[in-house]
Amino acid sequence: MPRMLVLSVNAGSSSLKISLYSITRPLENLGDKEPASLLLTSTVSGISSPPVKFSFRSNNSFEDIATVKDAYVDSIHDHEGAFSHFVQHLQAESSIDPNEIVHICHRIVHGGDYHDPVIISEETYNHIENLSDLAPLHNGAALAVIKACIKDIPSANSIAYFDTAFHRSIPNHIAGYAINQTIAQKRGLKKYGFHGLSYAFMLGAVSHFLQRPLGSLNLILLHLGSGASVCAIKQGKSYDTSMGLTPLSGLPGATRSGEIDPSLIFHYTNKAGKITHDRGAATNLHVTEAEHILNSQSGWKALTGTTDFALITDRVFHSSASTSTDLPDLEQENAELAFRMFTDRILNYIGSYYLKLHGQIDAIVFAGGLGERSAELRKIIGKEVKCLGFHSIDEERNQNVNEMDGTVVDLSLGNQKGKRILICRTDEQLEMARQCALEENFWKED
Ligand SMILES: Nc1ncnc2c1ncn2[C@@H]1O[C@H](COP(=O)(O)OP(=O)(O)O)[C@@H](O)[C@H]1O
Ligand SMILES: CC(=O)OP(=O)(O)O
Ligand SMILES: [Mg+2]
């Protein structure tokens, strides 16, 4: 029987993450095993702020690719270039024939009123393209990769999975904005929310870890990466989230301001409404100067000059200036401002969601590049939320998470019941591959 391979592609704002899975079907043969088993994974990071790093790893049990590669690559400038670098590497270093790939799952950040995954056709491509202005750092980049897939791997279907779909359960009074409702409805101006594939993965993983039915869980999920957001889960469904009509709202990020007073931008520049010429990776965007400033020239980049939160943390906690009596170091001051601002905004949402969930919360869950890797950030948030009845963080576990196995790691001190603090190694690619494997319609014989 031929192998059934699924490729999952996740175009984040600063990265392209690609994983290849072997799918077990029909589902009757599966029992409670995972339908998608990982063969290899590749990450291109730093796309929005070079140097761009390429990594390629095979799963240990997959013997015919022994390559583990990490390299800086000057020639990658955007997501499309990152994808073609991956395809070249796959062809050069592995025995995999791209024609074995049956489906390619693409994470599409903004789906508008599309909820279910859709096979890419002219119509669905145009729908996603029309939403590009509402996710200027994402949809265009994902579409460029879809185009490359259609050209380079024509035997596979491209299927779009939407970040926004997870948040369709948010009630109208929470998703709505206090503006003219006729215009709001006509133009679809409401909170859509993002990082939905990650939240779906986290919810499933935490349910499994706590051995609790999904629908019984109340959680505060933190997806903290180059784009960062918070989600309140009420009885297993999204009840509120910090991003809005676009991924700009809510928490600050690598290059995004996060929530501001909407009037601020008209005091920042007198060209706010002008269409900008600096369009970045996507070419068909109609992005105003205001959107460009707030999406691409703000956040950590504006505050500190770097988009790398690890470097910011290093400057705050490990800078030599912090132990010397010299004049304050400007780099360190800026890093401290960014770090403290981020913590402050995260606490705004935790406090608000705690109240909305009436304090009936099972866990706070950290995920994403920063959430999974910044022990410093978790330590400080952990300290602050103790007053809400959360367990203290076990600092030894917090510092040594990297050495611990498992999709979910419990940081709570002691193992008594109560409000826990967890880390989840989120995996948007696996979430898509799983959903794809389980969807009968995608596997029907013609
Ligand atoms: N050890 C670390 N400590 C703090 N932040 C980190 C660490 N490692 C990575 N990061 C941050 O994670 C970000 C990437 O997050 P990720 O969720 O993978 O990105 P994306 O939003 O592109 O999907 C990096 O830009 C970096 O700021
Ligand atoms: C929606 C969003 O901001 O995604 P990412 O963090 O992957 O850029
Ligand atoms: Mg991401």
Image (tube, rainbow, N blue to C red):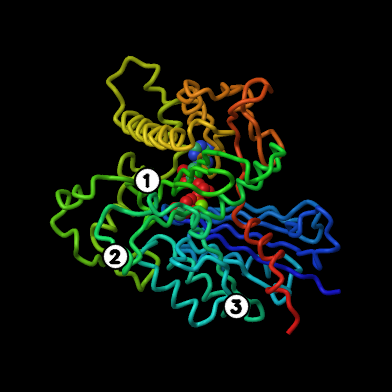
Judging depth in this view, the residue of 159 and 155 nearest the camera is 159
Q: Identify the residue under disc 3.
A: 152
Q: What amino acid is labelled 1 in the image?
A: Gly
Judging depth in this view, the residue of 444 and 299 nearest the camera is 444
Per the model, the C-alpha gap separating discs 3 and 1 is: 37 Å
Q: Is residue 320 left or right of residue 360?
A: left
Corner quadrant of residue 340: top left
- Quadrant that contains the C terminus: bottom right
Mark 1 nearby-residue class (10 Å; few <14, some 14–19, many ≥20):
many
Give the mark toward the camera: 2 or 3. 2
Q: Secondary structure at mark 3?
A: helix
- Quadrant that contains the N terminus: bottom right
Q: Is residue 402 left or right of residue 66?
A: left
Q: Position of residue 385 (x, y in %)?
A: 48, 25
Q: Which residue shows up at 27% across the image and 52% down it?
A: 178
Q: Identify the residue under disc 2.
A: 287
Give the mark toward the camera: 1 or 2. 1
Give the mark toward the camera: 3 or 1. 1
Judging depth in this view, the residue of 426 and 390 nearest the camera is 390
Per the model, the C-alpha gap separating discs 1 and 2 is: 20 Å
Mark 2 nearby-residue class (10 Å; few <14, some 14–19, many ≥20):
many
The disc, 1 or 2, on the residue closer to the chain's N-terminal end is 1
The number of callouts visible is 3
Q: Identify the residue under disc 1.
A: 250
Q: Secondary structure at mark 2?
A: loop
Residue 367 higher or lower than 363, as above or below: below
Per the model, the C-alpha gap separating discs 2 and 3 is: 30 Å
Q: What amino acid is labelled 2 in the image?
A: Val
